[in-house]
Image (cartoon, rainbow, N blue to C red):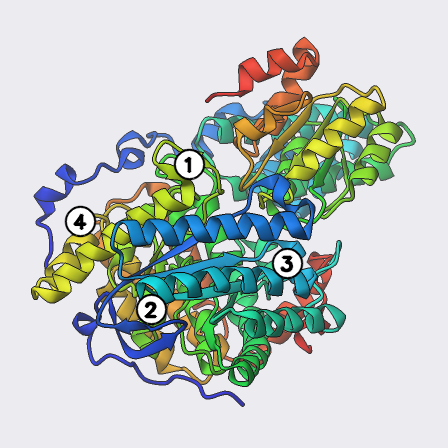
């Protein structure tokens, strides 16, 4: 077959990711971010490495040394997850690392709960679902993991969720935000029905939507819609709500990029 | 037992070309696919509100079909395939799908009768074998699924396809956790088992109805990996991991042809060049013309050996140049015209290589799928063709070797992250047993514990 000479390839295409790759390795970057406390450090490191057993061992060691389990959730587990989230946002580590770290963090939180009668606080409740008629849920699962990793309590309704079930869950849980994902053009129409029924009930909360066929134009057609282009936008939208309120127009100004 | 491929359909990679397959397929109204020319394959999606009722849906597809056929005639395209990928309402209610097929075919017959345009209708049934919580690959849902194929075939569909979901519950979990064994188990073992079951039954329906058992794609898994991997700057999945999933998917998609399908393979099966090398079936592909649906890193390359050239999917609505189906069918038709000219004037291999070289070094995915390397993956599969697990593992290891060769040549430049990810995948693969039964048993035990939605009975396990 025909082939290109090595020196000709750069004129055909540019591997911008190779050209821009950071010198520091992910492990080195993480090391700079870990807390220095000798009891907290191994917990944060085990979270970064996604090693569930190591997380539990380190938690046990910290509790044995006098740390309160309830404090370890925010001061160690969430801090470790914060390292992971920061490295992901900076493009130093990739999504599977975040997912494995999130698994380890949630496992650690469950362990801490078994060691105390105190109830841990979270940043807020969020209801997540996949549109009625749609069973494609990998995007929603990523959104759920990233929201939990960011410290939110997630009510995960699963996939193919009837519109009325979404409304009932919002009424029951009073979340700061609802998320909806869909892959198909015909199923994403359910988002508009969710929007209309929420407004009928007088519930004006941001409804962050994204996924395969979903686009900004479609989401802009209903009053509560805020378009999330990437799964990671869900946590950013939630953070924006916590920081500046749930004004949907303001959220659109920030997150509608097109 | 199904017949398994243990040798290559083509004696060497250079014999593979667009518009030509070892075993052309006649379909629909005067069309022969892979018989020396390429044909556009248009795919489309109804507007969101069209799914509100059966009547609205049928009307939408009538508009789509008329628009597309009229544009093909207006620009003088000699042939066209229309692919209707079912929205869930059409497969869950087989009569809906059948009425859409009938309405579309009636319009296509009118155009064929009046203008002589060669055309065929592919219906891709939705894989509806799920309930809210679990895959439900066997049982009641499977009966409705097969009924949808049969009703559509009787009502006018010429070619039957599906994007089947077997193994996806394990794959989805594993791909997000860099679990190489899980990726292999989901696609190469569970996916293959499900493919063998469904394609025997779909082929029986095709034989009964005089239609074409066309083939599948690992869209649900390998394309999920490709989409998560994204562009050069995305940080969601190593592209070296994504191409390993793709290589494994070829071993899985091959199962359709072993169970009686004859092609053309589905457009979004980027693994199809590997499949064509082994099975000699015609294939549909999508690349630069599917930017309306998604981005990839091999928009020209993937045209290399196509027999149908597709746009993947576009929502039906208006554009400056007409409706979307008119705009995209026209683009596809001009691409096919270019390929068909190259075939006529003896320049097809040059054009093929130009298409390949424009993307081959852009990304490890295109590098492995370039026809010369795709052929090598095919050989690795055929070497142990009788063993679904071993051939999938072979494909994955060969894929890693090919990428390493590319890196060593200096032409395929990867980030350290991608190289590290590749090394991990390869080490994981080399640590795996060669014993298919042990691999299956070990992974059954593991994933029954780790993946709450995994139901082994879906696979007869």
Instruction: Tell which subunit mark 2 falls on.
Output: B
Say which residue label 1 marks: B234
Q: Is disc 4 in the same subunit as disc 1?
A: yes
Q: Is disc 2 in the same subunit as disc 1?
A: yes
Residue lying furthest right: A117
Question: In this image, A247 relative to B12: left or right?
Answer: right
- Whichever of callouts 3 and 2 sits on the residue coming sooner in the sequence is 3
Q: Nearer the viewer, mark 4 or mark 1?
A: 1
Circle 3 sits in a helix, a strand or a loop, which is it?
A: helix
Circle 4 sits in a helix, a strand or a loop, which is it?
A: loop
Say which residue label 4 marks: B410
Percent position of residue B43, x then y: 44, 53
Give the position of the N terminus of chain A as an image quadrant: bottom left
Q: Which residue is at the front of the view, B162 or A9?
A: B162
Q: Is disc 3 in the same subunit as disc 1?
A: yes
Tell me if label 4 and label 3 are in contact, CB under 8 Å.
no
Instruction: Tell which subunit mark 3 falls on.
Output: B
Say which residue label 2 marks: B274
- Whichever of callouts 4 and 1 sits on the residue coming sooner in the sequence is 1
At x 52% / y 30%, what residue is drawn? A229
Residue B266 visible here = no
At x 44% / y 32%, what residue is drawn? A92
Q: Nearer the viewer, mark 3 or mark 2?
A: 3
């Amino acid at each position: 077959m025909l082939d290109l000479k090595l020196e000709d390839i750069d004129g055909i295409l540019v591997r911008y990711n190779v050209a821009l790759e950071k010198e520091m390795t992910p492990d080195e970057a993480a090391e700079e971010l870990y807390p220095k406390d000798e009891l907290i450090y191994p917990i944060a490191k085990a979270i970064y490495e996604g090693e569930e057993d190591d997380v539990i061992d380190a938690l046990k060691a910290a509790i044995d040394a006098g740390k309160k389990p309830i404090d370890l959730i925010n001061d160690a587990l969430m801090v470790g997850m914060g390292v992971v989230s920061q490295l992901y946002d900076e493009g130093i580590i990739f999504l599977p690392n975040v997912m494995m770290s999130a698994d380890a963090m949630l496992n650690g939180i469950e362990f801490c709960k078994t060691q105390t009668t105190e109830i841990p606080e979270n940043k807020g409740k969020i209801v997540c679902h996949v549109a009625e008629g749609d069973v494609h849920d990998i995007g929603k699962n990523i959104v759920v993991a990233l929201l939990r990793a960011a410290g939110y309590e997630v009510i995960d309704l699963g996939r193919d969720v009837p519109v009325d079930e979404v409304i009932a869950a919002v009424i029951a849980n009073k979340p700061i935000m609802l998320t909806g994902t869909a892959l198909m053009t015909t199923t994403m129409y359910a988002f508009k029905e969710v929007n209309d029924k929420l407004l009928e009930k007088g519930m004006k909360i941001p409804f962050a939507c994204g996924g395969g066929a979903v686009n900004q134009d479609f989401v802009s057609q209903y009053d509560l819609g805020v378009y999330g282009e990437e799964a990671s936008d869900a946590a950013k939208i939630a953070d924006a709500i916590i920081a500046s309120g749930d004004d949907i127009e303001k959220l659109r100004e920030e997150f509608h990029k097109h | 037992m199904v017949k398994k491929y243990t040798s290559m359909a083509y004696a060497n990679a250079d014999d593979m070309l667009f518009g030509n397959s070892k075993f052309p397929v006649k379909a629909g109204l005067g069309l022969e696919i892979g018989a020396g020319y390429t044909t556009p394959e248009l795919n489309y999606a109804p507007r969101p509100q069209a799914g509100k009722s059966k009547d609205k849906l049928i009307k939408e597809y009538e508009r789509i079909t008329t628009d597309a056929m009229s544009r093909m005639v207006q620009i003088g395209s000699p042939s066209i395939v229309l692919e209707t990928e079912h929205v869930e309402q059409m497969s869950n209610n087989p009569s809906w799908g059948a009425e859409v097929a009938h309405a579309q075919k009636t319009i296509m017959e009118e155009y064929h009768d009046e203008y002589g345009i060669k055309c065929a209708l592919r219906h891709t049934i939705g894989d509806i074998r799920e309930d809210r919580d679990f895959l439900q690959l066997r049982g009641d849902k499977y009966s409705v699924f097969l009924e949808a194929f049969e009703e559509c075939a009787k009502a006018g569909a010429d070619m039957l396809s599906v994007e089947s979901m077997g193994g996806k519950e394990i794959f989805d979990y594993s791909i997000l956790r860099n679990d190489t064994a899980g990726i292999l188990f989901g696609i190469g073992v569970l996916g293959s088992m499900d493919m063998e079951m469904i394609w025997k039954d779909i082929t029986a329906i095709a034989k009964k109805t005089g239609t074409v058992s066309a083939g599948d794609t690992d869209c649900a898994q390998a394309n999920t990996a490709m989409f998560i991997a994204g562009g050069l700057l995305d940080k969601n999945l190593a592209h070296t991991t994504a191409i390993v999933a793709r290589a494994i998917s070829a071993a899985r998609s091959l199962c359709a042809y072993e169970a009686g399908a004859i092609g053309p393979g589905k457009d979004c099966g980027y693994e199809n060049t590997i499949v064509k090398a082994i099975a000699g079936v015609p294939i549909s592909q999508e690349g630069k013309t599917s930017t309306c649906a998604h981005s990839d890193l091999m928009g020209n390359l993937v045209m290399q050996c196509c027999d149908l050239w597709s746009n993947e999917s576009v929502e039906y609505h208006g554009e400056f140049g007409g409706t979307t189906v008119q705009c995209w069918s026209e683009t596809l038709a001009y691409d096919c015209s270019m390929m068909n000219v190259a075939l006529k004037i003896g320049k097809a291999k040059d054009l093929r290589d130009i298409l390949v070289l424009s993307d081959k070094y852009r990304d490890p995915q295109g590098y492995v799928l370039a026809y010369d390397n795709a052929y090598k993956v095919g050989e690795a599969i055929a070497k142990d063709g009788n063993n679904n697990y071993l051939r999938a593992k072979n494909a994955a290891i060969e894929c890693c070797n090919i990428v390493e060769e590319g890196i060593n040549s200096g032409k395929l430049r990867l980030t350290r992250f991608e190289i590290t990810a590749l090394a991990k995948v390869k080490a994981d693969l080399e640590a795996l047993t060669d014993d298919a039964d042990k691999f299956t048993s070990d992974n059954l035990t593991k994933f029954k514990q780790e993946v709450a939605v995994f139901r082994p009975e879906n696979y007869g396990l």
